[in-house]
Amino acid sequence: MSAEFDQLVEKFEEFQAGLKNVDDRLAGIGQMQAEIGEIEAVATSADRSVTVVAGPGGAVKEIRLTEEAMRQRPQALSATLMDTLQQAVAESARKQASIVDAHLGGDLNATERVLETQAELFGTTPEELRSKLAEETAPARRPRDEQEDFSEQTFLSATDEPQRPGPSPSGGGSQGDAFLKNLFEEDDR
């Protein structure tokens, strides 16, 4: 009877450890959703005549055209718009995948999957896109002026600042939620 009881206790402890792992991973879902909700990817055409801003899930938030864009032939403008739109949506997907991996661990390999798919679609290499992702997610730094006034600036980094609670994991059906659902469904196939 003692051996059976020990086995039951061991199984129960394994089960509890598994639950704790799930709890730990789900604890950051609200923060992850908040970060995904703040995604903004900006792409500008080579001639600087078209700018597209994409948000979470590749949703197009804004398209800006210059006077130069309006002087283009319709087919040229259409091609420029599509190219710039694809760049913005692709950047948004890369950022979203890196946030998912950061919060849920690399075992999903969301970033690698996105990079491989985009490399195939755009006729490039995952390494080239990986370097682009590093540039996109690196904080923008500007050179410091020795005479700069720091009185209005915080000394905390973005990770040190108090975090506002994000939306509840059980809420709504955002485009970010749809992305995650599709990502998990792909794992099941």
Image (spheres, grey):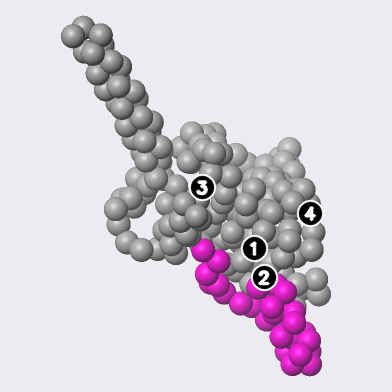
Quarter occupied by the N terminus = top left
**What residue is shown at x 44% (from left), y 47% (from top)?**
32
Numbered label attached to residue 90: 1
- Residue 99 located within the stretch drawn in magenta: no
The residue under label 4 is: 125
**What residue is shown at x 48% (from left), y 41% (from top)?**
103
Give the CA distance from mark 2 to mark 1. 6 Å
From where the camera sits, is residue 120 visible? Answer: yes
Which comes sooner in the sequence, label 4 or label 1?
1
Query: In the displayed structure, does residue 158 sit left or right of residue 70?
Result: left
**What residue is shown at x 79% (from left), y 92% (from top)?**
73
- Residue 71 located within the stretch drawn in magenta: yes
Which comes sooner in the sequence, label 3 or label 4?
3
- For numbered disc 4, what is the local secondary structure? loop
| Kind of residue indicated by mark 4 | Thr
Numbered label attached to residue 86: 2
- For numbered disc 2, what is the local secondary structure? helix
| Kind of residue indicated by mark 3 | Val
- For numbered disc 3, what is the local secondary structure? helix
- For numbered disc 1, what is the local secondary structure? helix
- Judged by depth in the image, the label closer to the viewer, 3 or 4, is 4
Q: Residues within 10 Å of mark 1 (few under 14, many from 20)?
A: many
Give the CA distance from mark 1 to mark 3. 15 Å
Give the CA distance from mark 3 to mark 4. 22 Å
Q: Residues within 10 Å of mark 4 (few under 14, many from 20)?
A: some
| Kind of residue indicated by mark 1 | Ala
The residue under label 3 is: 100
**What residue is shown at x 30% (from left), y 22% (from top)?**
11
